[in-house]
Amino acid sequence: DIQLTQSPSFLSASVGDRVTITCRASQGISSFLGWYLQKPGKAPKLLIYGASTLQSGVPSRFSGSGSGTEFTLTISSLQPEDFATYYCQQLNSYRTFGQGTKVEIK
Amino acid sequence: EMQLVESGGTLVQPGGSLRLSCAASGFIFSGYSMNWVRQAPGKGLEWVAYISSSRSAIYYADSVEGRFTISRDNAKNSLFLQMTSLRAEDTAVYYCARESHSSSSFWFDPWGQGTLVTVSS
């Protein structure tokens, strides 16, 4: 099975900060990777698919990059509504989620 | 508007069974693969099961293989998860999610609001 490891698991940041989250796959997954945001008590929301394609309606401050085994999600200028938990997901072989990265207010 | 609505979650005893449902609307249900994903209290997301649009492909996470069965009724725009031999560690919010694809990727969108399954005596 393909494992996904996100880093960091937790980060503290301020409004306006540039934030980068990394997702590493245990084996190559081409670009079959998505990123989701989840707020407490809510369902996950798709941000990016295909490693770098922004879902319709998602603000352009979110961007994704990478292929193979290493991927990044970048938020160029953190906004108050971005404080949440972020998950990567691979869809190359079955489906797997990373363990999550919680972004909290500094 | 695309919508997924789960139902069927409740308190069940260890060893018991339960059937979850997911009602789809706002899109052509029969044209999409579907998934179940769960989230234990305070924990991360765990993919549970996948079913293709025509039911020709079905996959399960190792943690539920042999105990859970995913199925669908395309005529009724509905997805199901039959859960048996339930354990305390199956306690979670269960989400259904539509799987979309392009020539070079797949993704889950939309998701339902989730239904809570609690396994406890």
Image: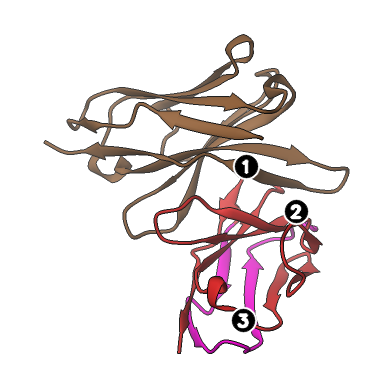
Chain colours: A red, B brown
Quadrant occupied by the N terminus of chain B: top right
SS at badge 2:
loop
The question of residue B115 being in magenta is answered with no
What's the amino acid at mark 3?
Answer: Leu
> Which chain does the numbered disc 3 sit on?
A
What numbered label is drawn on residue B31? none
Quadrant occupied by the C terminus of chain B: top left
Classify mark 3: residues with Cα within 10 Å, few (<14), some (14-19) or many (20+). many
Question: How many numbered discs?
Answer: 3
SS at badge 1:
strand
- Residue A69, how many percent across, how many down? 72, 67
- What residue is rendered at 33% in x and 60% in y? B42
> Which chain does the numbered disc 1 sit on?
B
- What residue is rendered at 21% in x and 28% in y? B15
Residue at the spot of label 1: B110
Residue at the spot of label 2: A32
What's the amino acid at mark 2?
Answer: Phe
**Left or right, B83 with reference to A43:** left
Q: Is residue A71 above or below residue B23?
A: below
Q: Are marks 1 and 3 on the same chain?
A: no
Q: Is residue B100 above or below residue B43?
A: above
> Which chain does the numbered disc 2 sit on?
A
Quadrant of the image occupied by residue B119: top left
Which stretch did the figure color magenta?
A: A3-32
Marks 1 and 3, Cα distance to the nearest angstrom? 24 Å
SS at badge 3:
loop
The numbered mark, 2 or 3, whose residue comes first in the sequence reads 2
What numbered label is drawn on residue A78? 3
